[in-house]
Amino acid sequence: MIQIKNLSFHYKKQTPLFSDFSLEVGNGHIVGLLGKNGAGKSTLLNLIAGLIQPQKGEISVNSFKPFDRKPNFLADIYMVPEEFSFPHISIQTYVKAFSPLYPAFDQQKLNGILEEFELERSANLNKLSHGQRKKFLIAFALSTNCKMLVFDEPTNGLDIPSKSQFRKILVSSVTDEQLVIISTHQVKDIDTIIDKVVVIDKGKIIYEEEIQDITSKLYFDTVPSLTGINNVIHHEQCPIGQKIIIPATAGNESSIDLELLFNAIINHKIKSE
C-alpha cells in the first residue's frame, strides 16, 4: 500500500517537480502511471522505492518510510528501472546470489517465466540483447512475489511477441496481496492489464480513476466520420475515420483506448469526478 501526503520534491537548482502532492493506492491493483515527458513519473517511482528523499511530506509504502531503506522494506519491494546493468555472470549465478534477499521468492515461478520468455539459465546476462535482459529482469521481479512491484517503461526494448508475453505473464503472476505500478509512454502495451489510471502533470494528479468506472461512463469507438455522432467528448483522426470518446449509455460498454483517453485528459477534455 502507498500513502503519500503533501509531498514536495525538487532537484538542486530546479523548480519544484512536486508540491503538496498526495496519493493513496491499496494493494490488489495494477496501476498505470501516465504523464508527459518531464511530468515526474520516474522521480515518483524513485521516491516510492526510497532511492531519493523528499524535501517535505510523508511517504509510506507497506507501512515503511522508503528512504529509511530498512531490510524488511527492501525485502518486499522490487523496482524494474528503465535503465539497468548486470554483472558479467549467468542467469543461474545471478538468481543464486540475489534470490535469497527476497523471502517469498518462487523458483518454480521463475523457471516457468524463463521458459515462456525462451531464456536459458546458463546464458551470460551481458551477452544477451537488451530485450532479453529486460525479459529476465521482469521474470526475476515477478518471481520475488514482493508486495510492491514497480516497473518503469517495462516494454521498452521488447518486440511485439514479447510485449504480448509480458501482459499475459504479469496478469497471471500477481495476486490481490500485491500492488503493481507501471509507468510508461507505451500506453497501448498496458491498456488491457491495468485496473486503475493515474495521470500526473506539472506535479499534480490531474486524473485518477479505476478502469471499470471509466468504461461505465465513457464509450470508445472508431467511426467513418463524425456525421450524426452527438456528444463527442474527444476525437482524433485515424486511417479509417475518427477515433471518438462519447458518454457511455446503460448496458453499452466498450474496451478502453488508453492512448485516446490520455490525450483527452492532457487536452482537458476529461477530468476525474
Image (spheres, grey):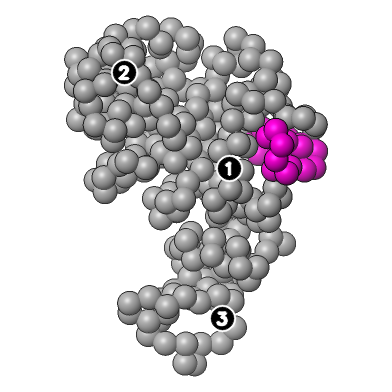
State which mark lies toward you, 2 or 3: 3
The residue that disc 3 covers is 232
Q: Which residues are magenta?
A: 1-26
Q: Residue at x 68, y 52 (%)?
A: 202
**What is the x, y in percent for residue 175?**
48, 32
Is 235 drawn above or below residue 203 in the view shown? below
**What is the x, y in percent for residue 43?**
60, 36
Whichever of callouts 2 and 3 sits on the residue coming sooner in the sequence is 2
Which one is in front, 208 or 269? Answer: 269
Which amino acid, mark 2?
Answer: Gln
Q: In the image, 160: left or right of 223? A: left
Marks 2 and 1, Cα distance to the nearest angstrom? Answer: 33 Å
Whichever of callouts 2 and 1 sits on the residue coming sooner in the sequence is 1
Mark 3, other Cα within 10 Å: few <14 / some 14–19 / many ≥20? few
Which one is in front, 64 or 248? Answer: 64
The residue that disc 1 covers is 41
Is 265 drawn above or below residue 248 in the view shown? above
- Which quadrant of the view contains residue 69? top right
Secondary structure under tag 3 reads loop
Q: In the image, 33: left or right of 110? A: right
Which amino acid, mark 1?
Answer: Lys
Q: Residue at x 21, y 23 (%)?
A: 127
Q: Residue at x 58, y 42 (%)?
A: 41
Would residue 121 be seen by someone viewing this image from the given angle?
A: no
State which mark lies toward you, 2 or 1: 1
State which mark lies toward you, 3 or 1: 1
Q: From the image, which quarter does the C terminus lie in?
A: bottom right
Label of residue 108 in the image: 2
